[in-house]
Image: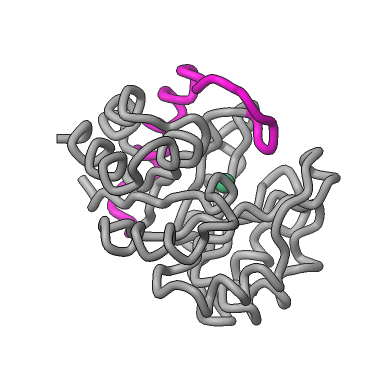
Amino acid sequence: MSEIKIAPSVFAADLGLLREQLAEMEQAGADLLHVDVMDGHFVERMAFGADHVRALRKLTRLPLDVHMMVERPENHLDSILDAGADIVTVHAEATTRLLSCMQKIHKAGARSGVVLNPATSEETIRYILDDVDMILLMTVNPGEGGQHFLPAVLDKIKCVRGMIDERPIDLEVDGSIDDKVIWSCYEAGANVFVSGGYLFKGSITENIAKLRKACE
Ligand code: ZN
């Protein structure tokens, strides 16, 4: 099983306390900072763009895991990569140029990732696996608040872990991950866990520890 990585989602952070919260995440052993970029088209909400990624780059040494919930991500890759993203994931549903996006991200020296919405079949990515460093499976509908973890995704996690086989690909899950559902995702084969609302309720340090402990 691959190494467990915890990726706090900056969307759920308190922007007024961002510097302190980033320092606490680093201290508590967070592995990545997950940055949700939302364009108001692919998802209803709008959040974070290249300028925010650039600002975050200066504020933290955590690798920036940029999740582009954006139509035609190919039009925005240059600015996101230039802003300092370490990992860029794009939705399979948002582009007809998925492989080309993966190649462009690699060419810029970043790690490439593909995201699948809950309704999208894993077959979509079967033939691009050699160009992918991370696969992100949505465990809720993207960009909508107040949702519950979708247990049907557990089957997809298992299928994708099987497809990954021996490749060094991280398998990330995103959406309502807490200390109750993380174990079933880990057991199914996920190893990178985005945590938003759960992580920022109460102590960030304790919550990161609880997530890790739940996987033991
Ligand atoms: Zn995300």
Residue name at image x 58 percent, y 81 percent: 108
Q: Residue furthest right?
A: 41
**Quadrant in which the N terminus is drawn:** top left
Q: 107 above or below 3?
A: below
Q: Nearer the viewer, residue 173 or 47?
A: 47
Whether residue 163 appears in magenta in the rendering, the answer is yes
**Quadrant in which the C terminus is drawn:** top left
Q: Position of residue 198 (x, y in %)?
A: 43, 34
Q: Position of residue 14 (x, y in %)?
A: 55, 50
Residue name at image x 40 percent, y 40 percent: 199
Residue name at image x 66 percent, y 68 percent: 52
Whether residue 194 appears in magenta in the rendering, the answer is no
Q: Nearer the viewer, residue 150 or 74?
A: 150
Q: 132 above or below 145?
A: below
Looking at the image, residue 31 sits to the left or right of residue 121; the answer is left
Q: Position of residue 181 (x, y in %)?
A: 36, 24
Q: Which residues are magenta?
A: 141-168
Q: Nearer the viewer, residue 201 or 47?
A: 201
Q: 54 above or below 15?
A: below
Looking at the image, residue 38 sits to the left or right of residue 161; the answer is right
Q: 68 above or below 211?
A: below
Residue name at image x 59 percent, y 49 percent: 11
Looking at the image, residue 204 sits to the left or right of residue 17; the answer is left
Looking at the image, residue 105 sits to the left or right of residue 25; the answer is right
Q: To which quarter of the image does residue 159 belong?
A: top left
Q: Position of residue 23 (x, y in %)?
A: 37, 65
